[in-house]
Image (cartoon, rainbow, N blue to C red):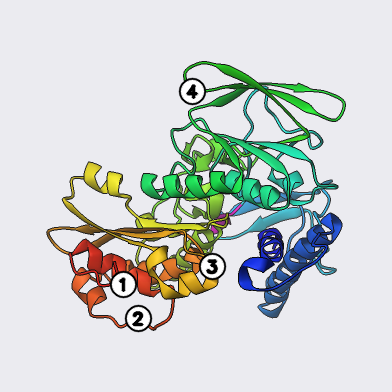
Amino acid sequence: ALLRSAEIYHYMQHAKDYGLSAEKVGFDPAGVVKRSRGVSAQLNGGVAHLLKKNKVDVIWGEAKIAKPGEVTVSATTKKVMEPQNPVPKNALGEGTYKAKHIIIATGARPRALPGLEPDGKLVWSYFEAMVPPAMPKSLLVIGSGAIGIEFASFYHTMGVDVTVVEVMAQIMPVEDSEIAALARKKMEKLGLKIHTEAKVTKLDKQTNRVACTVELKGGKSENITVDRVISAVGVMGNIENLGLEALGVKTDRSTIVTDGLGRTNVPGIYAIGDVAGPPMLAHKAEHEGVLCVEGIKGLDVHPMDKLKIPGCTYCHPQVASVGLTEARAKDAGYEVKVGRFPFIGNGKAIALGEADGLVKTVFDAKTGQLLGAHLVGAEVTELIQGFVIAMNLETTEEDLIHAVFPHPTLSEMMHESVLDAYGRVIHM
């Protein structure tokens, strides 16, 4: 919701490019946040309604697995986080509860680096970054994964002077290097400052500013003073105080080890979502939950294939991907065919004024199997699902080549990218 406000603000500022005029363009920071929280509240309320509709008992408190099949719940002093719905009036409370199957879905929390920990005031985690009391004039973002780069994009679009510091060689390290490089080029063209192969070594908190010491590539240090810092160095699973160690539940650093159906090494105990490890994505968690419950029910289900889970980053420009990157496919021993099609060759992209971007596809040269798809540009987070379906149906290049894509749409670039991989591209 925040990014949607930023997107509209961006278009208002560039109305002239579309033959339109908009005077005194501005924004109300409190109004932007209020709308965002309103959207979240509506979605949260929808989940509460589904629980009630399906007669799901809600137990309010802090749970610990005493032994397989038994959970003890104690009172909690933790407040309900807005805009979460209030505790249901008929919610159960403290006590011991028995169940043959126990699913752990405790989620994750922001990871903190020593000396760079969020304090909620000058140094923010994504919690504070979602609800800024006022818009800072300058901001430094530590980390350029999905969370970091999305906040960097949002605040920069809203007029904040933003610097991103990433320790790896590219921004969005899990993405295809070519796609990440194109995204960076566009972001820097828009004015975002990005340092890769760099790290923040010190934060000196002042009255209402933070002096940041950044070690750049090559060992040179630079001092950057900003109003606020966002720490976006990843997340860690909430596995503490659940009784896992005593039960012998296997964990890997901060997450619970499971199979493709959410089962842990202890019968009757399951884990889904962020606490069950990467990719830490909402749609992965939801599907994991469905597979877990269907498996418990005894239905014939297939284990989750994490390579077929799409990832979407809602920055400007958007980034989306599924499957193996070109580099990872080669590392895995595949001989590959790679197709590319730029947005500038697509009529709809030009009409939208969004001609920067690329659709890239990676195929197994021997079998025609689609190994991965990687996109950067307008609305690619909507386009990616076409490739996800193709991978799940095990389509080959021949199937995709003979599919008819509607015109004029951005989806035509998906077709052209496949054609390019096999030397049959038309509009380039």
Q: Which mark is residue 343?
A: none
First of labels 2, 1 by sequence position: 2
Q: Residue at x 64, y 32 (%)?
A: 112
CA distance for labels 2 and 1: 7 Å
First of labels 4, 1 by sequence position: 4
- Please indicate whether residue 14 sits to the left or right of residue 277 in the image: right
CA distance for labels 2 and 3: 21 Å
* Residue underneath mark 1: 415
| The C terminus, quarter of image | bottom left
Image marks 2 and 1: residues in contact by CB distance under 8 Å: yes
CA distance for labels 3 and 4: 35 Å
Give the extent of the magenta segment: 101-105
User: In the image, which is nearer the foreground, mark 3 or mark 4?
Assistant: 3
Q: Amino acid at mark 3?
A: Gly
Q: Residue at x 51, y 30 (%)?
A: 167
Image marks 4 and 1: residues in contact by CB distance under 8 Å: no
CA distance for labels 4 and 2: 45 Å
Residue 305 appears in the rendering: no
Q: Amino acid at mark 2?
A: Phe
Image marks 4 and 2: residues in contact by CB distance under 8 Å: no
Give the camera-side residue of 236 and 137: 137
Residue lying farthest to the left in this orientation: 366
First of labels 2, 3 by sequence position: 3
* Residue underneath mark 3: 353
Q: Name the element at disc 3.
A: loop
Q: Residues within 10 Å of mark 1 (few under 14, many from 20)?
A: many
Q: Position of residue 7 (x, y in %)?
A: 66, 62
Q: Which mark is residue 405?
A: 2
